[in-house]
Image (tube, rainbow, N blue to C red):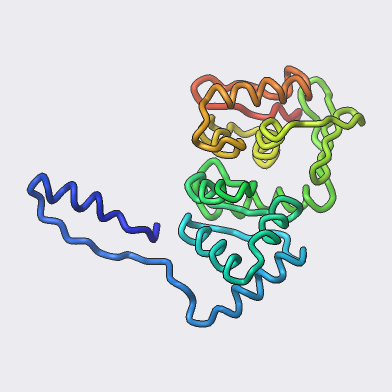
Amino acid sequence: HGQSLSMVAHALRRQGARVETVTIYRVEPAEDPEPIFGMIEQLAAGHVDAVTFTSAPAAAAFMDAATSAGLRDEVVAAFQADAVASCVGPVTAAAFELWGIPTIFPERSRIAAMVRQLEVELPVRRAGLQLELAGGIQLLLHGDEVLVDGSPVKLSPAPAAVLQILVANPGNVVSRQALLAVLPSGTAGSEHAVEMAVARLRSALGTRAVQTVVKRGYRLAVDV
């Protein structure tokens, strides 16, 4: 994905293999940096709804550009507030952990899946989303606000992150690995951290709200 894996070639050569490296594509600074700087300025000013990222090097290059523009803190704040950092998969999303930027990504690392997820996420950010969960529980999300049967619920960062990705995939199974990647601890955490976050989310929404799918992950129990 645009990063050198020279250590792999070196390991193969040590085993006697003849290896030729071929660069498929690489991430380099644009010849004209004005468009990226312009987008960063718009993002920092709160005028951008979402930015999509399809590789970890592209995510790192974007943040490097924000730093060069002197707007890194403003960009981080924008993503932590209303703007969506939409990633094609967990590897790309992991690149944002350094800055504490929340991300969304689909269960399948495909661009089409990323776009479909964003189609769901943006209306939620703008106007709120109401879902009926198992047992007739009414769940309303509006930005960072969560209401259950009309009453506000305060979620800590870990269960809030789990709820965000489950809502982006209503009724569909989200793997433990995908949930782990969105936790504040990131991939440095453990599956126990996922279980604890899910347990806290169930405590807030109701025990039937989040279903365990054996050997696969968890799903939001949407009443259809």
Q: Is residue 183 left or right of residue 29?
A: right
Which residue is situated farthest in the top direction here? Answer: 207
- Any part of residue 103 in sight: no
Q: Is residue 89 left or right of residue 2?
A: right
Q: Residue at x 51, y 44 (%)?
A: 90
Q: Residue at x 67, y 37 (%)?
A: 161
Q: Who is closer to the viewer here, 210 or 15? A: 15
Position of the N terminus, as image quadrant, is bottom left
Relative to residue 101, is residue 166 depicted above or below?
above
Which residue is situated farthest in the bottom direction here? Answer: 32
Which residue is situated farthest in the left direction here? Answer: 16
Relative to residue 103, is residue 214 depicted above or below?
above
- Which image quadrant for residue 171? top right
Image position, residue 20 (x, y; %): 17, 61
Which residue is situated farthest in the front direction here? Answer: 70
Count of picture labels: 0
Q: Who is closer to the viewer here, 35 or 118? A: 35
Q: Is residue 4 left or right of residue 165?
A: left
Image position, residue 148 (x, y; %): 85, 29
Relative to residue 184, is residue 4 depicted above or below?
below
Image position, residue 73 (x, y; %): 67, 59
Q: Residue at x 15, y 56 (%)?
A: 19
- Which image quadrant for residue 153? top right
Position of the C terminus, as image quadrant, is top right
Q: Is residue 58 left or right of residue 155?
A: left
- Any part of residue 212 in sight: yes
